[in-house]
Amino acid sequence: MDVTGIANVATAMTEANTNQAVSMAVLKKAINISAEGALALIEAIPNSSSVQNMPSHLGQNINTTA
């Protein structure tokens, strides 16, 4: 293998490592955005004081039709 071949392999490996690092950064950002969305949904759940005004039987049955 000549010097050019070795340089091409080294360049390809460096590019692959860079692409992998970018992919991981994008994945981490997507996970953080999802976590923020989930936290917002959890915080949007009404507190127990508003649930106390509901009837006790509410939410125990699911009505379905076939």
Image: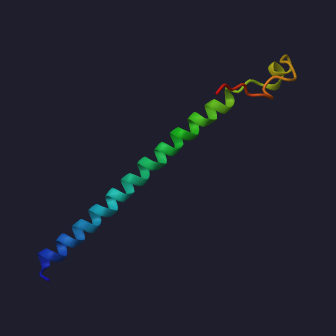
Q: Is residue 19 above or below residue 3?
A: above
Quarter of the image where the C terminus is located: top right
- Which residue is depicted at the point 73% across and 28% down? 62
Q: Is residue 66 above or below residue 26?
A: above
Residue 8 percent across, percent down from the top left: 17, 70
Classify residue 20 as left or right of residue 33: left
Which one is nearer the viewer's eye here, 64 or 66?
66
Q: How is the image coloured?
A: rainbow
Classify residue 24 as left or right of residue 56: left
Classify residue 61 as left or right of residue 20: right
Residue 46 percent across, percent down from the top left: 74, 24
Quarter of the image where the N terminus is located: bottom left
Quadrant housing residue 57: top right
- Which residue is depicted at the point 32% across and 59% down? 18
- State the residue lying farthest toward the top: 53
Classify residue 45 as left or right of residue 57: left
- State the residue lying farthest toward the bottom: 1
Which one is nearer the viewer's eye here, 49 or 28?
49
- Which residue is depicted at the point 28% across and 65% down? 14
Picture mark count: 0
- Which residue is depicted at the point 81% across and 29% down? 60
